[in-house]
Amino acid sequence: MRSMAWRHEFRVRPWDELGHWYGELTETHPEFGYLGDIVESIIGSPAAGLLAGTTSMHDLLITDVPVQPPPIECVIVRAPGSMHPPPPGCVLIEHLSHTGRNDSIERPAREAVALFWRFVQEKLGVDPATRVVPLNGVEALVRRRAAEIDAPTTALPTFGWTEDGARPHIEMARAGYAYVVVERGVEQSRQVTGDLDELLWWVFRDVTFDTACSFEVAHRREGEDFRRQL
């Protein structure tokens, strides 16, 4: 099926960088103010870690993480001067989907932030109230907890990439976090949660088992069932 989603590379720009860029643009062109307002609302949202942003000319493009290869389902906030500009004093927000059932809506610019979050929740499935720790924050927390119990770093998951070989990795997902196991290039399991505590339970359940297996191998007793020391 021919996708009608965004067909170009999605080069992610940090939210702070986008906020600064649109802020400077608004100083000389006030009509761009609603774009800066939307970015600032993302920066201040608990769900900021679930969204990625970039620009095409002055248009703002948003998708959920992890960012997929093109074609990419995304929400586009059209800017003044865009190839598809909104009327003066208005905001135009579009949704590009794989199915071709693209959608758009036009409202007064003062409604831009509320309209944007409505689209993000309906089209991308991201709830603005979801509290998410960014991936680098999750990694720092896992490593700190692992150090407290002297867990080897080799027992920890990777973050944002897979080593394969059945070593788990953590990535961001629409609902929060995904705990994924890949072996020989095939995804064996994927657990998804919006609860950081549940994610940590999954991580240290496996860390504990891995550590116990290493201990048993190092202290194996001839003739004893290996499970006695696990």
Image (tube, rainbow, N blue to C red):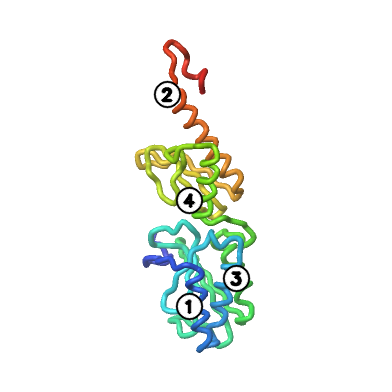
User: Mark 1 belongs to which amino acid?
Assistant: Trp
Secondary structure under tag 3 reads helix
Amino acid beneath label 2: Ala
**Could you tell me the amino acid type at mark 4?**
Glu
Foreground pick, 89 / 128: 128
| Mark whose residue sits in front, 2 or 4 | 2
Spatial separation of the CA atoms under disc 2 and disc 4? 32 Å
Circle 3: residue type = Ser
Spatial separation of the CA atoms under disc 1 and disc 2: 56 Å
Quadrant showing the N terminus: bottom left
Total marks drawn?
4
In the picture, the disc for residue 21 is 1
Residue 39: x and y in percent read: 55, 72
Q: Nearer the viewer, mark 3 or mark 2?
A: 2
Asked which secondary structure carries label 2, the reply is helix
Q: Are marks 4 and 1 in contact (CB under 8 Å)?
A: no
Q: Earlier in the sequence, mark 3 or mark 4?
A: 3
> First in sequence: mark 2 or mark 4?
4
Q: Which residue is mark 3?
A: 41
Residue 71 horizontal/vertical position (percent): 40, 62
Q: Which mark is residue 218?
A: 2
Q: Can you tell which mark lies on residue 171?
A: 4
Q: Residues within 10 Å of mark 2 (few under 14, many from 20)?
A: few
Task: Answer with mark 1 or mark 2, whichever residue precedes in sequence.
Answer: 1
Between tags 3 and 1, which lies in front?
A: 1
User: Residue 50, relative to residue 228: is it above or below?
Assistant: below
